[in-house]
Amino acid sequence: MKNPTELIAELSLLEKAALVSGANTWQTRAIERLGIPAIWMSDGPHGLRKQLGSADHLGMHGSEPATCFPTAATVANSWDEDLGREIGAAIAWEAREQGVHVLLGPGLNIKRSPLGGRGFEYYSEDPELSGRLAAAYVSGIQSQGVAATPKHYAVNSQELRRMVSDSVIDERTLREIYLTAFEIVVKNARPWAIMSAYNLINGTFAHEHSDLLQKILRDEWGFDGAVISDWGGSNDAVAAVRAGGTIEMPSPGFDSVRQIVRAIENGDLDEHDLDARVLEVLTLVDRVESAAPAGTSTWMGEHHQLARRAAAESTVLLRNEGVLPLAAGTRVALIGDFAAAPRYQGAGSSLVNPTRLTTLLQAISETSLSLTQWVRGYQRNGSPDDELLREAKAAAATADVVVLAVGLPESAESEGLDRADLTIPRVQRDLIHAVTSVNPRTVVVISGGGAVEMPWLNSAAAVLHTYLGGQAGAEAIWDVLTGQVDPGGRLAETFPLQLDDTPTAGRFPSAGPTAEYREGVQVGYRWYHGQALDVAFPFGFGLSYTSFAYSDVDITDTHASITVTNTGSRPGTDVVQMYVQRLGPSAVVRPAAELKGFAKVRLAPSQSQRVRIEFTDRTFRFFDTRTAQWEIESGDYEIYLGRHFGDTRFSRTLPVTGTTSAPSQDLCLPASAYPLGDEEFSSLLGRPVPANSWHTGALTANDPMNRLQDARSALGRGAYRVLVRQLRKAEKKGEPDLNALFLFNGPFRVISKMSNGLATQPVTDAVVTLANGRSLPGAWRVVCAFLRGRAEERRTRQAFTRATKGRRS
């Protein structure tokens, strides 16, 4: 392929307009006459998902076998950038072998609430940890010549109505919490692509948000890659090109192409903007198409072992009353449906078809333990079953130790829906109480994508949270339970005592058109500290089978250092975490001490290591809304080095000369004032708080389809009832219906945006007319628009084919 800059001059307007939208569900368009190939994109946050045959973006259809690694939420608990880099490289290696050029991941949205249904795909509640781990993944992926696509940029926090939800947020919170992780990735790892989010940010769709895509991403951070829309996330193709949105996916057919061409011909769009987007597309193609294909056949076994190691090092030991590790010969009763049919990954677009899958029941045979019995223990769908409970108690009574496999079922967390609560199913809670009453030496092993409430905690001898451990997760669990591997995980999110304690309690997910970020910068551990709330387990917490001593703290102007010694009798891993807090009164709202660095150490018994954590340009900064830039407030700062948030035993005070001594902010309230009321939130935003209620007028193309419930048309209301029945049927089966969820929460515009040209924007407009009660005119308009659109698509496709093959018309 020629130099991308030179190619632009040889492209026709039609060809340029066609390059900024997909050819189909997964590929870009090719220009044969100029040697511009199509490139293949595929989901890949924790494993490749290249689909076979019929393609869809939700994971409904099958995909090529690939290694299913632990999810991002799991690996985040490792606090291990080297491990993330290894996993990223392995996934990309498999991508190259299968002809995939662009991996759609990693996901690094901040976990604003533990109820977020897609939390298993995201790293942390903290932007420093999220950004550094995601940057490691991106570096690993691109080391193999595959483009990484960090997502979803930006402020994407809930699944409910995610394609129409407007994230209402103040500038400082946006910058410090929700953009910082992306900033770290862009500056440290230089990704070749980035994926924009579905949602709006302060009234503007993410894929056409010029401040986010141009001013911040490109001008400020230096991003030089392509911005790819989330699948169906494009709203206005012309506005996207103007604002910095590069590629519209999956494929709107040639409808968007015609809109762009008309806008340029009418003077509504500057062709220079289109040229900038085309250059981004061609640069992406140039970067990925030259990489050599993979060339060995031994990767399956190697990658399975990497997945096993990653799962073990990410497992978090939350409680251990002397029962772990299990000694050789221990007689174990294995209880729980998850032991035979594991929860090892989430549902939706990240669904991987594993190359192999092990279970706890299978893998115990590889250990030195003695299995006395396996019993199911509970119905996976949550139905009470007294017989299963009796079997479990009988099995528990005959064993030295019980390993009880519980957690969140598939229906509890998935792309497309948010969690209803933080509890595991009632039948599992009852099982824990019943089993521990018979055998107190019970080890509870939890599978799930995030935090859960544990009112039963003190009845268990040990608790191991494995998150979602991928295809080798079961082997990894036995590695940890038997002490072959020290539990290396430290929580990447806070575990609250109860849902009511969380920063968005009663407000998440927002059922209205807006999601109001009234908690401001008080997210995760910042919130619990500011509200003086006790938690079940603090951010960064995790136990080991050995013990560590910290000594010789030293703080300079450039770094913090400390000596870590393994004082126990077993090898183990620890994570030194650095938190920074400004002391004394401040003119800005200050959250609690914030994570600003970390380092993982592996030590043999009696071994010591000097750990050094460098300060960065993020260590002392805050975003000043007065100057609209990052500033450092002069004063004394406390530097804490510890094993988790709140571990303040090792600290030193450091005087810092900053860029300002008296910053002024529009609003300075104590942490206890959050979440903010209307007046305070309006002051923080600098504008009135938008109404969070659906309009009562006629439906529009950007209204969610679940608003058909209120449609004036009987046909529309009937369609709503069909969708509801489909969702209820899925609930009874215990498996989310992702297609129905997508339609239920998605806007009418997806009719044209995701039909690959089968429907055009006029068809969507006609459907909306029909739903608004004008049944006969609406139906006639649908038919006419469909036929007219098919004819336009045929003509445009023919013209494009002639042009790209160098034929004369």
Image: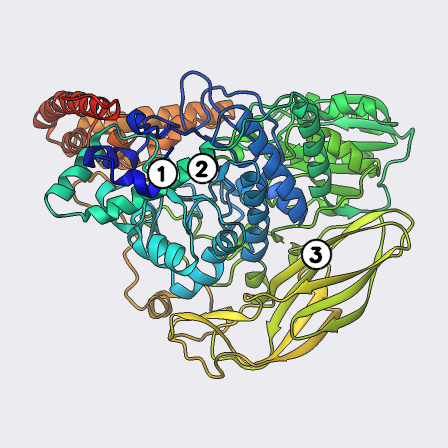
Residue at image location 45% in from the left, 37% down from the top: 417
**Which type of secondary structure does the marked residue at label 1 adopt?**
helix
Q: Mark on residue 599?
A: 3
| One can see residue 162 in this view | no
| One can see residue 24 in this view | yes
In the image: residue 385, left or right of residue 697: right
Residue at image location 70% in from the left, 25% down from the top: 377
Q: Mark on residue 417?
A: 2
Between residue 723 and residue 214, name the one nearer to us.
214
Between residue 396 and residue 780, name the one nearer to us.
780
Is 14 rendered above or below residue 650? Answer: above
Identity of the amino acid at label 3?
Ala
Q: Earlier in the sequence, mark 2 or mark 1?
A: 1
Identity of the amino acid at label 1?
Leu
Q: CA distance from mark 2 to mark 3?
A: 35 Å
| Residue wearing tag 1 | 282
